[in-house]
Amino acid sequence: MTDLIPLVVIVPLLAAALCVIAARHRRVQRVLSLVALTSNVVTAIILLIEVDEEGILVTQAGGWRVPIGITLMVDRLSAVMLVVSSLMLISVMVYAIGLGDEERRFAAFHPIYLALAAGVSASFITGDLFNLFVAFEVMLVASYVLLTLGGRREQVRSGMTYVIISLIASTFFVTALALLYAATGTVNMVQLAERMPELEAGVRLGFSLLLVVVFGIKAGVFPLFFWLPDSYPTAPGAITAVFAGLLTKVGVYAIIRSQTLLFPPDDRQGTLLLVVAALTMIIGVFGALSQDDLRRILSFHVISQIGYMIFGLAMFTLAGIAGAVFYVVHHIAVKTSLFLVAGMVEFRTGSGRLSHVGGLVRSAPVVAILFAFPALSLAGLPPFSGFIAKFALVDAGLDKGVYLVVVASLLASLLTVMSMAKIWLGVFWGDPEDARVVRRLRDPSSRSPYLMGIATAVVVSISLALIVFADPVYKFAERAAEELLEPGRYVEAVLGADDGS
Amino acid sequence: MTVLFAFAAALLFATGTWMLLQRRLSRILIGVGLVGHGSNLLLLTSGGPGGSAPIIDTGDPADFSDPLPQALALTSIVITFGVTAFLLALGYRSWRITRDDLVENDVEDRLIARDRDELLEETLLAEQEQRDEEGLE
């Protein structure tokens, strides 16, 4: 079964190569993309079942032994991330085919989207820090191209900021890798975990902080988030959903992985991360309240929500990390669906400004329903998945005694309800205020294609399924957290497997 | 040699950071290149002092230089190269659109900031008027 692990990277990359060859045949490209992304979903689900029964799965790329070869490992956290991300990737691809704009105009769309999928999957399965850097780069370079695909003025502008910030983060990452290698002589995560206690406390602290900054830039935590609300809204419709749903969560995943696996418990940056988490939640949601553009409001919410995940991790307790894992799963589904709905609103009205659009509850009731569920879930109202996730975090926070952060999280939650109400009032109630929007709403040919609606509905129902299956999912998150808090298991799984081969 | 490399890396980082702080993409690009070289050099140096080529059966393995950081540095150089090429293309596109490669302000962000300033000005004006009226009475 461990042979399946590399497939989540190889299949999309292979399909990307074939898509380049089939550049002139859009149908062939579509079939290739959908087949590759479906294969990823299937592989991810098999891995999830397998890992839950047998524990951490490990394979060595090319059969080379540990210090030389690249370790690929799948634990419960990676498996659940793989399942959710592959489900989102295929839904958004269907949505993009329905939307048709960029997907139809650029032959490069499919290969680059598949490269992005490969990069995201590779980040989740790697057990080697340098390989994580390469996976990040594959994902980021694909995202640079997708972000600037139209070549419009504001895309070029925000693309510059995005690329430069990501590049600086990558340079930090390479620097951190160089220093880690000089200090320990390895970039394999498990070996690093073994050798880390031998280093001096000051050096360990330096590494820990450097990695938090590197992954913090990718995740968009306070105060490193400023590039996010600037660049995400300018990306093509469907693409923003993948960016907001997945890319920052890869950063969160990397923070969870590096903090739990690499560093001994007394080096974990608990207090720092708690402060960062509280500030991220509050400042993100304040940013959202002040915006007028639909996608920008949602982008600021991404930041605010990242704070909750970091909050869960920063407690370093079983309940906290389990809450964080559940939160990530819930957030990916909800955030992706909100951005997909935003894309539908823009398609229908031709504008994403709250001051221009209005009255969609009458002219596009389906869109209104598709918006209402994830919006209430994001705000954390019962019985939606956001309520369960936030309840788990608050409960863990009260156990741990971090009352200030709990208060901050509840305040942020309240403000989230406010800004969701603001979107609802601006987009769905009232009357459209812009003449162009009114004209477009009267034109029946501007209805969103069925495929867009179906893809969005699928993602929304995934987030609704989290309510029904909250118990098994939360229990799974608890098992994942248990695993994460015992780095010894990883050492045993990787080095033990190595002796056998 | 290692000390020399360390100083060279430091110099590259310092000059690169200065260039990164400029407003023109062409200069930022040079900065990115310099900082990237600095980190690659650091990666190369992290393998310890150099030695003979690490090929089995050609000498004493104790004299070999460590091949892993070299491989890592090579990977990292290729990535930096690719991204620099992309940034150059972006700069060219920007020049074609605006005849400039200045990194522009975020319009939406400025708009919201301006709204607030206007609001502030209006309130101040209203307060002033009120005070004037009260003064007249």
Image (cartoon, rainbow, N blue to C red):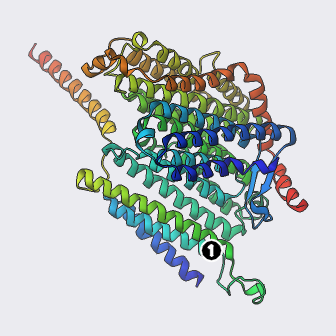
The answer to which quarter of the image holds residue A288 is top left
| Label tally | 1
**Residue B77: x, y in percent?**
53, 68
At x 78% / y 44%, what residue is drawn?
A: A485
Q: Which is nearer the eye, A263 or A117?
A: A117
Which structural element holds mark 1? helix
**A486 w.r.t. A401: above or below:** below
Q: Nearer the viewer, residue A239 or A258?
A: A239
Is residue A144 in view?
A: yes
Q: Dividing the picture into quarters, in which one does residue A405 lie?
A: top right
Residue located farthest toward the right when viewing the structure as drawn: A500
Characterize the local packing of mark 1: few (<14), some (14-19) or many (20 or more) Cα atoms within 10 angstroms: some
Indicate whether A447 appears above or below A336: above
Amino acid tagged 1:
Gln
Q: Of all residues shown, which one is farthest toward the left? A: B136
Of the 4 image quadrants, the one containing the C terminus of chain A is bottom right
Q: Is A382 left, or right, of B120 in this rendering? A: right
What is the residue that sits farthest to the bottom in this orientation? B59
Q: Residue under mark 1: which chain is it in?
A: B
Q: Is residue A95 above or below residue A70?
A: above
- Please tell me which residue is depicted at 60% across the width and 30% down the height of the picture: A333
Label 1 sits on residue? B70
> For the point 76% across and 23% down, which residue is it?
A471
Where in the figure is residue A466, as x and y percent of width and height?
A: 68, 23
Q: In the displayed structure, does residue A221 sit left or right of residue B25?
A: right
Query: Which residue sits at x=60%, y=44%?
Result: A250
User: x%, y% of residue A217?
Assistant: 52, 49
- Outermost residue on the top side: it is A362
State which quadrant residue A207 falls in: bottom right
Image coords of residue A96 (percent x, y) = 49, 34
